[in-house]
Amino acid sequence: MSIFQKVIRPWMLLKWIYRRSKEGMKEKEQQEKVKSFTKEFVKMRRIELKNSLKVPSPCFLNFMLTAAMENPNFTFKNIEDEVTTLMFAVKKFFHQISLKSD
């Protein structure tokens, strides 16, 4: 829901009302899908990394998984949160670029 839509419907600014609206329920469903995808992807990648005999490629996720294996304070929940945040940031970045290119 955009800021403009919330301005013309100010009651949607209240989280407890928004979460019960059609838009709020749809947003929650989408968030759960992203979290589920991220969790499965991290789980799959962690298994691949543990079973691999080769040196892992230097990517963000491999770096975080290696750090989690070496540091017990850095949990897999932390990795899932970071990956989800990164996915949303990248989406927003490319959305902004697409708006400027029009």
Image (spheres, rainbow, N blue to C red):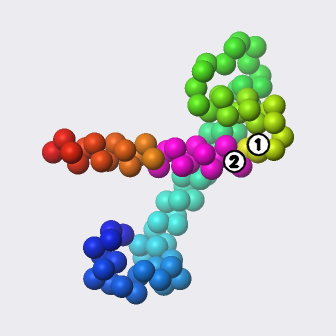
Residue at figure coordinates x 73%, y 29% from the top left = 66
Q: Residue at x 38, y 49 (%)?
A: 92
Residue drawn 73% across and 18% down?
Answer: 52
Q: Magenta segment, which residues? A: 77-88
Looking at this view, is 91 or 28 the one in front? 91
Q: Position of residue 35 (x, y in %)?
A: 59, 53
The residues bearing labels 2 and 1 have C-alpha atoms spaced at a distance of 6 Å
The answer to whether one can see residue 46 in this image is no
Name the quadrant containing residue 50. top right
Disc 1 target residue: 74
**Circle 2 residue:** 78
What amino acid type is highlighted by mark number 1?
Answer: Phe
Quarter of the figure with residue 74: top right
Task: Inspect this view and state whether residue 76 appears.
Answer: yes
User: Camera-side residue: 32 or 5?
Assistant: 5
User: Predominant secondary structure in magenta?
Assistant: helix
Residue 81 belongs to the span the image colors magenta: yes
Q: Badge 1: how crowded within 10 Å, few (<14), some, or many (20+)?
A: some
Q: Amino acid at mark 2?
A: Asn
**6 is higher (above) or lower (below) than 75:** below
SS at circle 1: loop
In this rendered view, identify the residue nearer to me: 52 or 5.
5
Identify the image quadrant of the N terminus: bottom left
- Identify the secondary structure beneath mark 2: helix
* Circles 2 and 1: CB atoms closer than 8 Å: yes
- Identify the residue at horizontal 61%, vertical 19% (top origin): 57
- Coordinates of residue 60 in the picture (x, y in percent): 59, 31
List x then y, in percent, for residue 28. Answer: 52, 66
